[in-house]
Image (cartoon, rainbow, N blue to C red):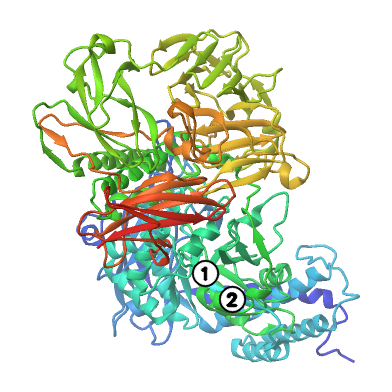
Amino acid sequence: MTRQTTTPLPQLIYPRVIHLRRRLKDLIYKPITGARADIQVGPVHHTFISWEEAVTEKYESIRVGDSFSPASVTKDGVKEFPWTQRWFRIDLQFPPDVLQKGNEYCLYFLAHGEFTVYTNTGDVWCGIDPVHDRIPISSLLQGEQSSTTIWLDGGQWQTGFWFGLEVPTDELGFRLLKVDLQQKSILAKDMYHDLSMLVEWVEYTYGKENIPLNTENGYYHPLSTVPPSLRRILNLLNQACDLFDRTQSLSDLGKEIKFIYGIMTTSSEDMKICHVGHAHMDLVWLWPERVTYQKIIHTYSNVLQLMNKYPAFTFTMSQPPLYHHIQKKQPKLAEQIKKKIQSGRWEFTGALEVEADTQIPVGEGLVRCILYGQERIKATRGSVSDTVWIPDVFGYSQCLPQIFFLAEIPNFFTTKILWSTLTKFPHNSFVWIGPDGESSVLTHLSVTGYNSKITMKEAMVAVRNYQQADVHDEVLCPSGYGDGGGGPSEDQVERSLRMQRSFIGETPSCRWDTVDSFFQRLSLVKDDLPMYRGELFLEYHRAVHTTQSDFKYNLRNCERALQTREALRVISGNFVSLDMAESWERYLFALFHDATPGSSIHSVYQELNAELKLLAERQYESAVEEWPQQPAIDTSNIFTIVNPLAWTRYAIVEVPEDLLDGDHSSHIVHSIEDNVCDSMQLIDGKPCALVKLEGLSAKPYTILPKSAEQARGTVTNMEASPTSLSNGIVNAEFDKYGQLCSISIRGEPLLITKDEAASFTLHDDNPEAYDAWDMDHHIVWMKDKVVKEPVTLKVVACGHIASILRSEPIPVGANGSTMEIEYRLYPKQDSLHVSCFVDWKESHKTLRYQIPTEYRGDVARFGAPFNFVDRSQIPQTHKEEGQWEVPASRWASILNGNCDGLSIITQAKYGFRAKLGTLSLSLLRSSTFPDPTADQGKHNIQFAITRHQNTFQHKTDGDLSIPTAAKADELFTQPIVLSRGNSMFKPATKPCIQFTSLGSAVPSWTMPSKSEGLQGRGFCIRLHEVSGANTNVLFSIPVPNGKMAVVESVNLNEKSLTKLNATSFDSGNKESSYNLSVTAYKIVTLRVLYF
């Protein structure tokens, strides 16, 4: 008897089905006989040109196999892609009798690089890359037309190397690899995808049952003990193979597969996958910014092709700079996107202007990133985004939930925290609580990352790994190829559509939807989700807080410049807010999570460093230009000093040399308001004076000849010797190696260990992967002290304003690096200033400064964009040991049990370590990828050492003590000196707000109010609590005649939270006084409006 439909060897069915799938794939596309594609290429462009310009150029023929660009160029000793553009013209010709209505025709185009296709009328058509390698042609042929011309904007870069096509070699360069006009069989395509999903189910089941697939020659494992469903499906698939082998009929095969689907699939929805099309786009990374905009045009044109073909497909877009570039360069494409947004299928979300780093920027930078991002999103889609979208960032500050809450954003999506290498984060959906205990944001961590491939195995793994599946039945899966991969592919959409119904009731059902809709459903079970309070620390990419030192310095300088300019507007009574595009936009761009961390290529930092320098200069210049002026009265030697910070301070200011008539030593600086005089001292070759400034004040000064009784200058108790410095508040001593070995402040010693001084250390730093990103664990012990021979510190200045010690150049490492160490004390300050002048030539080394102390409390405290974060300094568990390098926003303190301790405050350094009483600061690294020259060259690194302080306090004799968090601003934010030869800058009549008590609330930013409909009427001042305790803030507001002041606490959008009533009114000074209670960790925005 002959067996007809079954086999006793079911283990042979799977390889037979795989073979059938290969045969089906080969049937999808077939060459069109007699069709021609004549290709020409235009000249090389270093500045990208438009289609309108390209069509006027001269072109030359190019054939398959030809090279059209070198693979790389070397500039400034750095090898990168050419970053050039060449346009291609392709004339397509079909035999007239071949084309049939309803058929699909395409051009298979494979070449190195990334391409955007334009029609003969100049419209963007689609993108070409290793994932999207076919250009649809059918709808470009109008009527009886059998020919057309298309244009390809070719970019000479191939940064999406992870998508399968080999990177061009220096030997062969960028090449044209294959071109073919083809007809597409829709039936074969459908059969291929139908069969592929059945194969994926079989493969998943094999894996679940631990059955080897045996797709190569060799032994095929028998299916002895398997689920009955697997036997039945394999049998049906075997019958389908029989049918196709007999008939070679795709339609007959289709009926058989449809029958199998009917048996296998069910509408059961035990778990669901919410697919959203996405193309994660790094604004810079392994390519410069100008290339990003080429990538996004090519990607979004692909997305539109998919949307027009698949009505169910949806797409999520973030980061306004991308869309706004398209609006500027490709308005027709932007209009198509906007229509899709209005239809609800294209979602513009994310809330942020860019997907920013969240730990290095100051808090105000993150706030403006949201406010400006939301402003631009609303202008496009008609409403703000409900979701902060940061899928790829290297750690998450614990102040984020409060920022999002105050910005009225209920949802947060990310995934990167799942990359942690030592401890597994316990939740996927949870309520992230802010440190204040009141603010929160609904959070989802996608278990599939942000580049889902849409496979059955991926879907099954996702739902099995979803920790909240007990209360929520859905997982969000952003799907598509980013960074130049062209976005979601047709294959991905086809697979997803076949997964709409569950297979055997085991697989999740899939659907296309939007991020906002997903979070709306998740919010229904919010009360059943776990809560998490604290930072989301990423146990990976620990070096990003240090790499690219110059960039971080320029970024911080830009923040100070913006802070100063906005404060000066308020101080001068100009309550008109800055134009965001002119002032903030480019700074916000630089916050992108592969720019700020230092993980981009050389050319990115060449461009951004220059831009940030210019932006900072422009802000300072504009601050001066905008200040109101009046003609000089009698002399031109009057100048104004403005304090952009909100508290009283002593500051060292540089006196305008053009106002000095002769030597500085024969003149004094005279405060016109206070009638206080002080002599000057040359510091770094510049005449400088010590001044006392009220917060947010502008005071007039003049230069006067020094009288005999003023010749001695102010008594400030400044002392210096080669082994010590003192200013009457700080006493510091140094050992024979020039290292700090003892320091006391106000007579109380800081507990530096007696048997070991502070030191500079050099560490081996050659991580196994991600060079610019990572510091591997062995960096902790693979180190050596830099200073091994005695060092003589020389007294280079000792006056009433500054005492300075400096070393000779000290050799560092084995490559000729050198370092000079400088220590400074200024009067009325309780901090020892340290400068390192480093000529850095090392490779795969890290330079650190460490202070061993006897502060052995449970935690060390680290600055954050707002507030702070406490981390254990005792490495008891993997989690604590894994924090061998941690981020801090410019300061860190090693503490004992009662919060006494030693602090390091930096100008622009963010990487620290605090374990077992030793506090260390990372100063420089020398990674070689992706920038082989990272941090090479000369650096002036500045930081300060002081006692940790939680609150503002007034000591004796006018000595002011301020919180460590405030010192991070004060020590490196200079007052502005306004001086002009033929005019006098008007001083402000009275500070716009005077704080008489701040407690532990630090004012972080002062700015004009942007209240809708009320611009120009007042200002806002942002404060944050920095000790973890409740505090009271007392302040007064001047009320001009005929005016009424309205003082409120508002959220980040300036919506009123609480109206403050004055506690008293001083009619003589025309001031209203207020009392504001600030609870622990709170971020508070005060708004003052005048009517």
Image quarter hosting the C terminus: bottom left
Q: Is residue 5 above or below residue 222?
A: below
Q: Which residue in the protein does label 1 denote?
A: 410
Q: Is residue 291 left or right of residue 417?
A: left
Residue 46 lies, in percent from the top left, at 30, 46
Question: 752 or 59, which lies in front?
Answer: 752
Question: How far, Cα to Cα, is label 1 from label 2?
Answer: 9 Å
Q: Which residue in the protein does label 2 denote?
A: 523
Question: 895 or 109, which lies in front?
Answer: 895
Image quarter hosting the N terminus: bottom right
Residue 949 lies, in percent from the top left, at 56, 37
Q: Amino acid at mark 2?
A: Ser
Which quadrant of the view contains residue 523?
bottom right
Element carrying mark 2: helix
Q: Is residue 362 above or below residue 98?
A: above
Element carrying mark 1: loop
Residue located at (42% from left, 87% from top): 102
Q: Is residue 724 above or below residue 125?
A: above
Residue located at (55% from left, 55% from top): 1079
Pointers 1 and 2 in contact (C-beta within 8 Å): yes
Residue located at (70% from left, 76% from top): 471
Residue 814 lies, in percent from the top left, at 58, 18
Residue located at (53% from left, 59% from top): 402
Q: Is residue 605 visible?
A: yes
Q: Is residue 673 above or below residue 186?
A: above
Residue 568 lies, in percent from the top left, at 28, 44
Which quadrant of the view contains residue 884?
top right
Q: Amino acid at mark 1?
A: Pro
Count residues near mark 2 (Cα–Cα under 10 Å), then give few for <14, some for 14-19, many for 20+. Answer: some
Question: 868 or 294, which lies in front?
Answer: 868
Which quadrant of the view contains residue 691?
top left
Q: Is residue 444 left or right of residue 624?
A: right
